[in-house]
Amino acid sequence: MNGTDMPCWWMVFRLASVVAAALGGLSCGASIQAVYEGDVRFEHCMALDAQGDVKLPIRRACWLEWVQFYTYGQTRDRVIHAQIRIRQLSSVSEFVDPSLSHAGDSGGPAGGR
């Protein structure tokens, strides 16, 4: 016995449990690096959506990659936004230019005659 009237194995056990709890507390949650990478990739996909000259398959691939690899630590609204964008980009034909799809709406031969 030592001078504290506690067996030596009990002190080692208590010390080990304190160290384990401290290390466990540090490892909870998303790492700062993972959240940062997810933020950067999300903004990259948003920028691709804002550029009109980027092809739809590239935009869709960006969002698919983000959902597969970068959602750890991200907020639910971002994940939902990405899933909606994937559905929107999947429902549009790759061969139709969205900027030209409303050209016939201003009247003309196919108007309401």
Image (spheres, rainbow, N blue to C red):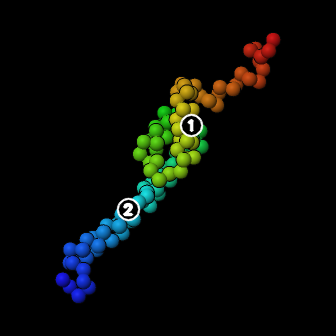
In the figure, is residue 107 to the left or right of 42? right
- Position of residue 49 relative to residue 97, above or below, is below
**x 57%, y 25%: residue:** 96
| x and y percentages locating residue 39 in the rendered image | 50, 53
Residue extending farthest to the bottom is: 3
- Whether residue 71 appears in this view of the structure is yes
**x 52%, y 27%: residue:** 94
Residue under numbered circle 1? 84
Q: Earlier in the sequence, mark 1 or mark 2?
A: 2
Residue under numbered circle 2? 27
- Position of residue 17 relative to residue 59, above or below, is below
**x 74%, y 15%: residue:** 110
- Position of residue 19 relative to residue 45, above or below, is below
Q: Quadrant of the N terminus?
A: bottom left
Cα separation between marks 1 and 2: 32 Å
Could you classify mark 1 by the number of other residues whose Cα lies within 10 Å: few (under 14), some (14-19), or many (20 or more)?
few
Q: Nearer the viewer, residue 90 or 24?
A: 24
Residue extending farthest to the top is: 113
| Residue type at the position of mark 1 | Ile
- Whether residue 33 appears in this view of the structure is no
Q: Quadrant of the C terminus?
A: top right
| Residue type at the position of mark 2 | Ser
Figure quadrant of residue 107: top right
- Position of residue 80 relative to residue 110, above or below, is below
| x and y percentages locating residue 71 in the rendered image | 46, 48
**x 65%, y 25%: residue:** 101
Q: Nearer the viewer, residue 56 or 64?
A: 64
